[in-house]
Image (spheres, rainbow, N blue to C red):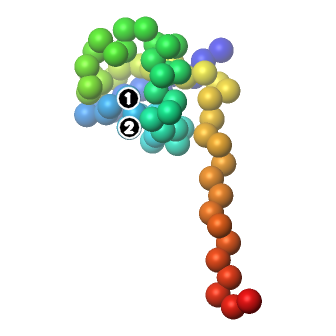
């Protein structure tokens, strides 16, 4: 099963998956493998273009180091 993302005007693939899922450049290859032909569209996706995303593809939780002002 896959979720479908829809491009807004001027979206690139990496911008779309970052905005909708918080995914980065390391995940582009997996998205392109699931969407044959998307790379042929060009750098900017047309308005309304759909991109399938695997349901299991979610970002790893980001943690920030704890800063202690006083020890």
Q: 10 Å neighbourhood of mark 1: few (<14), some, or many (≥20)? A: many
The percent coordinates of residue 42 (x first, y second) are 25, 19
Q: Quadrant of the N terminus?
A: top right
Residue lying at 65% horizontally and 58% vertically, measured from the top left: 63
| Above or below: residue 55 compared with residue 23 | above
Mark 2 near mark 1, Cβ–Cβ under 8 Å? yes
The answer to whether residue 42 shows anywhere in this view is yes
Give the secondary structure at mark 2: helix
Determine the CA span between mark 2 and mark 1.
5 Å
Position of 54 compared to 18: left or right? right
Residue farthest bottom in this picture:
70
Residue lying at 34% horizontally and 16% vertically, measured from the top left: 39
Residue farthest front in this picture:
71
The percent coordinates of residue 61 (x first, y second) are 66, 48
**Quadrant of the image occupied by residue 68:** bottom right
The percent coordinates of residue 40 (x first, y second) are 29, 12
Residue farthest top in this picture:
36
| Above or below: residue 36 compared with residue 61 | above
Q: 10 Å neighbourhood of mark 2: few (<14), some, or many (≥20)? A: some
The answer to whether residue 20 shows anywhere in this view is no
Give the secondary structure at mark 1: helix
The disc placed on residue 13 is 1
Residue lying at 52% horizontally and 13% vertically, measured from the top left: 34
Q: Quadrant of the C terminus?
A: bottom right
User: Camera-side residue: 55 or 8?
Assistant: 55
User: Camera-side residue: 67 or 2?
Assistant: 67
The percent coordinates of residue 62 (x first, y second) are 62, 53
The disc placed on residue 15 is 2
Position of 26 compared to 1: left or right? left
């Amino acid at each position: 099963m896959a979720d479908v993302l829809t491009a807004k005007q001027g979206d690139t693939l990496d911008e779309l998956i970052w905005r909708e899922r918080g995914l980065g450049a390391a995940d582009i290859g997996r998205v392109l493998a699931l969407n044959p032909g998307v790379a042929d569209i060009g750098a900017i996706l047309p308005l309304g273009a759909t991109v399938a995303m695997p349901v299991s593809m979610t970002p790893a939780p980001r943690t920030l180091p704890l800063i202690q002002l006083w020890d």
